[in-house]
Image (spheres, rainbow, N blue to C red):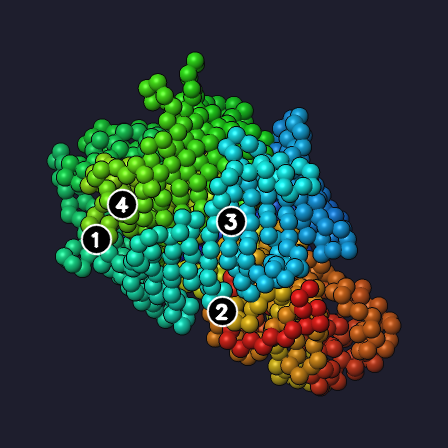
């Protein structure tokens, strides 16, 4: 539960007991001596000395304080202690959290009221409003009320009800009804599943979701692979002026509401479920191939009616899974270099081979914790303008919390104060650059409050101020208001901004999605506007831009489909084919159905090459010639943009973080929109506190190292090693409401190791029988066991998060909403344990196929090194598993008082005490069993400690605990045995 000043692992770790006997402080501090090869990279280590992250635990092991120490490079002698406070109820469930700023004002960021099962009943957020959720006896949400404002203001509340199948059926979701306060109820979603006809079974549709009527229209699935991958998917849309309302029970009436055109995407997959080909709604086919390790080795594209062309020609990977070399179909080669000690990316070189030309050569220099200090572009020359040297370098500095506090680089000499306008273009020959510097200021809750920009040679000097509410972390640019007391009125109850800039209104859907932006409002004439429509997963499906030009309104419409964007206007019909697997580059092919402009060839291929955080830096054509070059300010917005023609510049839409920039100036990330001129999100994080207690903060104020892929949480874009990817799973898990005492894999591992130490310490003195049992137990062989209806015989087991990313159909009932909110373990694949040689169970409600993998064959799998074992159902961590039947208990223990003791035993005080590192699985379970057994009668102890056969050990394990093995992200094995169980095909 600690972080050293520069992220170095603790060689000087100490634990101190403090005056409060109910709390323990974990503390670490270092004096580091660091040597850099370049003077400008020197870090003042005194800034970080004695600035640990401290977690205070109460006597239940719950984290009640998070303490950090802030120092700024400008004032290194001033230390600001910042305390985030957490409160828990009598059951150890969260009740309140407050950051330093709101705590000082007597307020809390979040307040929680759980139901009897521990699930959130009411979540009250200063930023996102209040949400009330009621669950049924099965843990399924059946009523949700959101958008409740302060003082229980329900004037804009949204009530959502969920309808499920009858009790004699699997209980799957049938429909969702929404009602905005003062409005009528609308059925916004309907779920129709396949039956058991011969045709449906031949397409693997029995029991699958075959028609999903959602807010955008209808999504139909025509065929599903044995792995659960949809093979035929069709999208139909509602008319632009029609809101979803699927009333009645007549599906033909629902279909009558839809617009006529259908958009069908088809796929083929290999035996492991990897997609091999995808044919989009206009008949363009993408093909990919993988090597024996499952890594991409090539991709191709065939535009409808054309011949196949190479997109990715070859790739080379290191033993650690890092990309070393990549060659594209345009003859451009990118090579990657990494620091030997840390495996951090230190170089990206992109060059055209014939004729030879280096297009990009980026060099990165870091501080010891991995913050980027300098980025050098060695492919470009130093320029001179107005007696200043303009070097192609960027420099960055950070405070002790690793927040970016200053940046310098180059910008267009014609640049003005950053605003919502799209970037101005300059030709390569006419581009003139100048130096700039920026200073960033934050409050003690992490809100960006000021951006001071200076470019002396061009006179582009300005300050952007952000006004933060005095009651929350809501904030707006100061041109909207300079009074903190007025900020709340500029947000709706759910935490969404009402205005973008003065005079630019924002409208939101009942699901808190941005519905419309009105950049220009006119009296007596049509407004300029941009409208959006989303699917059930809140992903944008349609964008409609209307702009008054002269005496007429010009309308452009974009439909977003898998691998394809249809961009149409009165004068143009354009297909933008988005190549899904293209290595480092984002590849977009422009195919005009009509209205092709002069100056661009049809089927023009644009390779977009990115930087460390995924921003589109270079665009290169199919011949390896440069189309455009763009650089960005740290928090987004274009610093310089040069292109070979205005026309080609106009067709660039992918920019900062690899995201589309709309005409509004906003970047669209998937779940949220981002305003780069303010350095903050437009709305509260729909994922809650997964990325921290400040749910408007952009990438923890470190945009040089961190990126955000979907608008939910930050991560390091490059060099995702297995350890780093596993760490994301544990960071997500740490947000589960039942967990405390860890924030990432390192602190989780520390807790897991402490659990083993504690249970061994509690059983220092062992009887010969107990010692013999522990010795024999550790020689047992185990199988990992997974039940599923899907064909997983090729040995790929994805987490729920990965299944959703890959759009693989799965049984959503395996994890209840309570499991997800309380535990956040949906980024792990789950396995039960079975003793080899024992007759294990043959049926499960989780599926009709039983998959077994020998545990001894898993040790070399990359994510297995970061797996852990939970000894029981963690949702009910303090009691023995209720599914252990009396029959099995009696088979092991004849004494009913022993059985009663086991059923009453409090297994743990906190959920984090029930986990072990995967490497300690056998030892941890053995000591756990002994710890419980020592309280039984002599007869009961003898029965347990005398176990010798696999069947006896299996009986002991199933009565005492129900352990599960959790593997981050996914589990892959070639040693899978499949058994069709008694409920196969159910």
On residue 234, the disc is 3
The quarter in which the C terminus is drawn is bottom right
Identify the residue at image location x=61%, y=72%: 851
On residue 624, the disc is 1
User: Residue 578 in the image: x percent, y percent?
Assistant: 37, 49
User: What separation in Å lies between label 4 and label 3 (alpha carbons)?
Assistant: 27 Å
Q: In screen coordinates, is 836 left or right of 55?
A: right
Q: Which residue in the protein does label 2 denote?
A: 271
User: What separation in Å lies between label 3 and label 2 (alpha carbons)?
Assistant: 23 Å
4 or 3: tag closer to the N-terminus: 3
Relative vertical location of residue 67 with respect to residue 787 in this rendering, above or below = above
Q: In screen coordinates, is 292 left or right of 887?
A: left
Residue 17 sits in quarter:
bottom right
On residue 602, the disc is 4
User: What separation in Å lies between label 4 and label 2 (alpha carbons)?
Assistant: 37 Å
4 or 2: tag closer to the N-terminus: 2
């Amino acid at each position: 539960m600690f972080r050293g000043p520069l992220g170095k692992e603790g060689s000087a770790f100490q634990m101190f007991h403090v005056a409060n006997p109910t709390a323990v402080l974990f503390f670490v501090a270092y004096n580091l001596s660091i040597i850099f090869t370049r003077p400008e990279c020197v870090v003042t280590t005194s800034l970080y000395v004695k600035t640990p992250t401290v977690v205070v635990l109460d006597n239940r092991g719950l984290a009640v304080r998070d303490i950090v120490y802030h120092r700024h490079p400008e004032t290194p002698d001033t230390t600001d202690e910042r305390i985030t406070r957490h409160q828990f109820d009598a059951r150890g469930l969260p009740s309140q959290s407050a950051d330093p700023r709101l705590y000082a004002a007597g307020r809390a960021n979040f307040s929680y009221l759980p139901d009897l099962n521990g699930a959130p009943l009411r979540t009250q957020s200063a930023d996102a409003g209040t949400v009330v959720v009621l669950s049924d006896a099965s843990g399924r949400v059946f009523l949700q009320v959101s958008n409740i404002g302060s003082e229980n203001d329900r004037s804009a509340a949204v009530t959502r009800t969920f309808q499920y199948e009858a009790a004699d059926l699997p209980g799957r979701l049938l429909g969702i009804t929404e009602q905005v306060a003062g409005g009528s109820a609308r059925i916004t979603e309907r779920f129709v599943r396949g039956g058991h006809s011969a045709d449906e079974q031949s397409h693997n549709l029995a029991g699958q979701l075959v028609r999903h009527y959602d807010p955008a229209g209808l999504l139909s699935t025509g065929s599903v692979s044995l792995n659960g991958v949809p093979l035929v998917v069709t999208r139909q849309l509602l008319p632009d002026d029609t809101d979803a309302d699927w009333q009645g029970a007549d599906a033909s009436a629902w279909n009558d509401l839809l617009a006529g055109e259908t958009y069908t995407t088809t796929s083929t997959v290999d035996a492991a479920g990897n997609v091999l080909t995808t044919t989009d709604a206009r008949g363009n086919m993408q093909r990919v191939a993988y090597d024996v390790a499952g890594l991409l080795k090539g991709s191709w594209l065939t535009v409808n009616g054309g011949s196949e062309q190479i997109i990715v020609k070859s790739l080379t990977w290191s033993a650690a899974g890092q990309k070393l070399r990549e060659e594209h179909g345009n003859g451009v080669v990118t090579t990657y270099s990494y620091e030997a000690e840390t495996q951090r990316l230190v170089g990206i070189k992109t060059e055209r081979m014939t004729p030879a030309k280096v297009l990009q050569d980026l060099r990165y220099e870091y501080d010891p914790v991995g913050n980027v200090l300098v980025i050098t572009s060695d492919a470009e020359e130093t320029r001179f303008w107005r007696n200043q040297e303009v070097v192609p370098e960027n420099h960055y500095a950070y405070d002790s919390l690793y927040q970016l506090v200053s940046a310098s680089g180059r910008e267009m000499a014609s640049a003005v104060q950053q605003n919502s306008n799209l970037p101005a273009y300059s030709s390569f020959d006419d581009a003139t650059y100048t130096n700039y510097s920026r200073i960033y200021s934050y409050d003690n809750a992490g809100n960006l409050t000021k951006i001071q920009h200076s470019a002396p040679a061009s006179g582009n000097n300005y300050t952007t101020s952000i006004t933060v509410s005095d009651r929350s972390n809501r904030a707006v640019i100061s041109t909207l208001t300079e009074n903190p007391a007025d900020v709340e009125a500029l947000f709706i109850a759910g935490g969404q901004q009402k205005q973008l800039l003065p005079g630019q209104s924002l409208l939101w859907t009942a699901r808190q999605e941005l519905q419309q932006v009105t950049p220009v409002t006119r009296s007596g004439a049509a407004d300029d506007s941009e409208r959006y429509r989303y699917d059930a997963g809140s992903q944008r499906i349609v964008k409609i831009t209307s702009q008054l030009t002269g005496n007429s309104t010009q309308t452009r419409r974009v439909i977003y489909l898998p691998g394809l964007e249809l961009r149409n206007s009165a004068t143009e019909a354009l297909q933008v084919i988005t190549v899904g697997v293209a290595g480092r580059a984002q590849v977009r092919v422009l195919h005009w159905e009509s209205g092709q402009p002069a100056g661009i060839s049809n089927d023009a291929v644009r390779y977009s090459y990115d930087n460390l955080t995924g921003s589109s830096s270079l665009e290169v054509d199919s011949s390896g010639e440069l189309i455009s070059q763009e650089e960005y300010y740290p928090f987004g917005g274009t610093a310089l943009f040069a292109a070979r023609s205005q026309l080609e510049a106009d067709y660039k839409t992918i920019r900062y973080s690899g995201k589309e920039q709309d005409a509004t100036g906003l970047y669209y990330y998937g779940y949220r929109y981002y305003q780069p001129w303010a350095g903050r999100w437009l709305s509260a994080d729909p994922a809650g506190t997964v990325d921290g207690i400040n749910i408007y903060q952009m990438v923890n104020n470190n945009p040089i190292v961190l990126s955000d892929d979907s608008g939910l949480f930050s991560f390091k874009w490059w060099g995702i090693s297995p350890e780093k990817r596993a760490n994301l799973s544990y960071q997500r898990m740490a947000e589960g409401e039942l967990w405390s005492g860890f924030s990432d894999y390192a602190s989780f591992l520390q807790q897991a190791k402490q659990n083993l130490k504690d249970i061994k310490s509690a059983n220092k003195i062992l009887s010969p029988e107990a010692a013999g049992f522990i010795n024999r137990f550790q020689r047992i062989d185990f199988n990992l066991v997974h039940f599923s209806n899907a064909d997983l015989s090729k040995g790929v087991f994805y987490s729920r998060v990965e299944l959703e990313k890959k759009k693989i159909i799965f049984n959503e009932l395996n994890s209840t909403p309570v499991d997800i909110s309380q535990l956040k373990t949906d980024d792990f694949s789950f396995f039960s344990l079975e003793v080899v040689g024992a007759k294990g169970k043959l049926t499960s409600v989780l599926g009709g196929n039983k998959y077994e993998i020998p545990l001894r064959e898993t040790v070399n799998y990359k994510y297995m090194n970061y797996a852990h074992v939970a000894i029981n159902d963690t949702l009910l961590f303090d009691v023995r598993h209720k599914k252990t039947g009396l029959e099995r208990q009696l088979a092991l223990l004849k004494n009913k008082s022993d059985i009663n003791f086991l059923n009453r035993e409090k297994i743990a005080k906190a959920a984090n005490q029930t986990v072990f590192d995967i490497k300690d699985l056998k030892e941890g379970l053995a000591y756990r069993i002994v710890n419980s057994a020592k309280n039984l009668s002599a007869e009961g102890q003898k029965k347990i400690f005398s176990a010798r056969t696999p069947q006896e050990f299996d009986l002991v394990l199933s009565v005492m605990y129900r352990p599960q093995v959790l593997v981050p992200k996914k589990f892959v094995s070639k040693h899978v045995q499949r058994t069709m169980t008694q409920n196969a095909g159910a």
